[in-house]
Image (cartoon, helix red, strand yellow):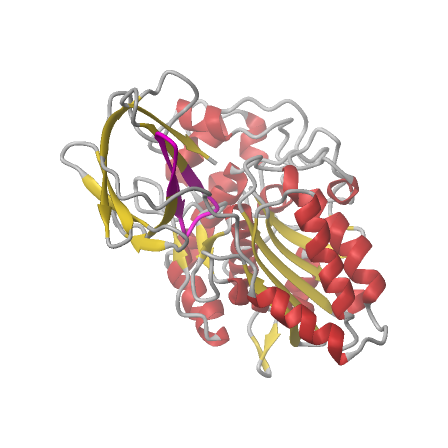
């Protein structure tokens, strides 16, 4: 497929050098997977929370509704969702259209999500319409999460289908993807702007669908005209916008897609990427878990442009291929160093610093079990299995948690990965003082 194994290795080197916690990587060229890897404990079959890459899928649902004649770019929110319109709605809010929502040009200078939810905790559409505008609609781009939530509700209203159900029937089903899961707000509605869980392969397949103009297996799943429109630049982006730490985020914005130096991409917090480079017939899917929500995005894009692209259409040798295959097979996150001492201890969480995942005073018990340990947290307790030199899985609150740990002197340290998300908890227990700390990464 004309992809140098040395170039892929250089990409892995750059990711490591920048200390990006990568969870998966898949490179597709000319329609074929040429390199794929998962950093243990992440794995190929496990869906991963995509954060705002979800927006690009919602965009496809909008395109389907438009193609069906049920919606248009000029349709106004107040006309499609009249029951969500506040009595004191301003004139600018009355003018907001599907185009403004898709391109995030409603007239804000920052994300309105927090204020919209504060104004209307039970109705984000109404809250979005109540947040004051700072510029005329259509004049500037500002990354604004509620715009996608509103789009999802408009699609649902005109189609009579929930967003997840519509995409299952019209997109995921025809592509053979049967595991799509959406996080939902309290009313049961899918976020739309976030919350989609997919495997890395499904993300790469979505990129390939876009690259082929919405066609999959000889069937036109998404109208070609919509794919071309959604992935074209509609507005300039500004340095103050979300994620604009580098050149690619200043290339413009489409309809729920970011433009890039060599194509376009769906981007999600903590390093989720679906990158399409049409001129190179290339798709790259990445999932990550960097503790800074936006930091890895430009670093990963830079690595692709600077390490992978120069290796396209260059000769390699089978020795390089074999070395890369072995390296990809051995990818793993750093484990917790220390001993497998079969010790027990009891402590309580000290939540005086930061924003811990467990309340202050939460009881923590460690007991040895089968060469590892079991953690009991809270009262009544829920249990987490912890391995030593291996990852052990449990589902203490209905979500899978994969954990490993070790004793370091009088401290027990464990990493608890909420494995269908980019996030983990580092738990440190001081047996000498009976105190413990828990910190999100």
Image quarter hosting the N terminus: bottom right
| Residue that protrudes farthest toward the left in the picture | 380
Q: Is residue 155 magenta?
A: no
Residue 329, image x, y percentages: 56, 67
In the displayed structure, would residue 147 be above or below residue 40?
above
Residue 300, image x, y percentages: 69, 49
Q: Is residue 419 magenta?
A: yes
In the displayed structure, would residue 179 be above or below residue 248?
below
**Viewer-closest of 375 and 197:** 375
In the image, 6: left or right of 352?
A: right
Prevailing SS of the magenta stretch: strand
In the displayed structure, would residue 154 be above or below residue 276?
above
Residue 348, image x, y percentages: 25, 24
The residue depicted at 45 percent of the width and 63 percent of the height is 167
Residue 369, image x, y percentages: 23, 50
| Residue that protrudes farthest toward the top in the picture | 352
The residue depicted at 48 percent of the width and 42 percent of the height is 150
In the image, 230: left or right of 206?
A: right
Q: Which residues are magenta?
A: 406-425
**Viewer-closest of 264 and 10:** 10
């Amino acid at each position: 497929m004309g992809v140098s194994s040395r170039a892929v290795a250089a990409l892995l080197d750059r990711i490591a050098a920048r200390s990006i916690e990568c969870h998966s990587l898949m490179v597709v060229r000319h329609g074929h997977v040429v390199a794929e890897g998962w950093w243990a404990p992440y794995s190929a079959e496990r869906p991963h929370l995509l954060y705002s890459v979800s927006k690009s899928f919602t965009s496809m649902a909008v395109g389907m509704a438009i193609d069906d004649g049920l919606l248009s770019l000029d349709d106004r929110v107040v006309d499609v969702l009249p029951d969500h319109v506040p009595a004191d709605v301003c004139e600018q809010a009355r003018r907001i259209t599907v185009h403004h929502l898709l391109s995030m040009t409603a007239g804000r200078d920052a994300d309105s999500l927090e204020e919209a939810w504060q104004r209307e905790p039970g109705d984000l559409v109404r809250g979005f319409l109540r947040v004051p505008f700072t510029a005329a609609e259509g004049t500037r781009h500002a990354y604004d999460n509620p715009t996608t939530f509103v789009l999802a509700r408009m699609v649902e209203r005109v189609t009579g289908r929930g967003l997840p159900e519509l995409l299952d029937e019209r997109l995921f089903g025809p592509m053979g993807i049967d595991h799509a899961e959406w996080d939902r707000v309290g009313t049961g509605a899918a976020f739309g702007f976030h919350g989609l869980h997919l495997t890395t392969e499904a993300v790469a397949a979505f990129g390939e669908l876009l690259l082929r103009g919405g066609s999959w297996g000889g069937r036109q799943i998404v109208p070609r005209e919509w794919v071309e429109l959604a992935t074209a630049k509609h507005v300039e982006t500004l340095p103050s916008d979300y994620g604009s730490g580098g050149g690619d985020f200043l290339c413009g914005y489409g309809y729920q897609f970011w433009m890039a130096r060599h194509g376009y991409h769906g981007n999600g917090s903590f390093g989720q990427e679906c990158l399409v480079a049409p001129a190179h017939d290339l798709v790259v899917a990445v999932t990550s878990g960097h503790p800074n929500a936006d930091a890895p995005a430009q670093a990963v894009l830079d690595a692709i442009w600077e390490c992978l692209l120069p290796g396209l259409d260059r000769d390699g040798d089978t020795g390089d291929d074999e070395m890369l295959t072995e390296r990809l097979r051995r990818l793993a996150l750093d484990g917790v160093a220390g001993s497998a001492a079969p010790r027990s201890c009891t402590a309580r969480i000290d939540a005086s610093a930061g924003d811990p995942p467990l309340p202050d005073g939460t009881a923590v018990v460690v007991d040895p079990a089968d060469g590892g340990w079991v953690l009991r947290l809270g009262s009544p307790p829920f249990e987490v299995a912890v391995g030593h030199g291996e990852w052990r899985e449990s589902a203490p609150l209905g979500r899978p948690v994969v954990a490993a740990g070790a004793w370091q002197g009088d401290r027990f340290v464990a990493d608890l990965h909420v494995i269908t998300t980019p996030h983990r908890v580092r738990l440190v227990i001081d047996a000498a003082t009976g105190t413990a700390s828990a910190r999100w990464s």
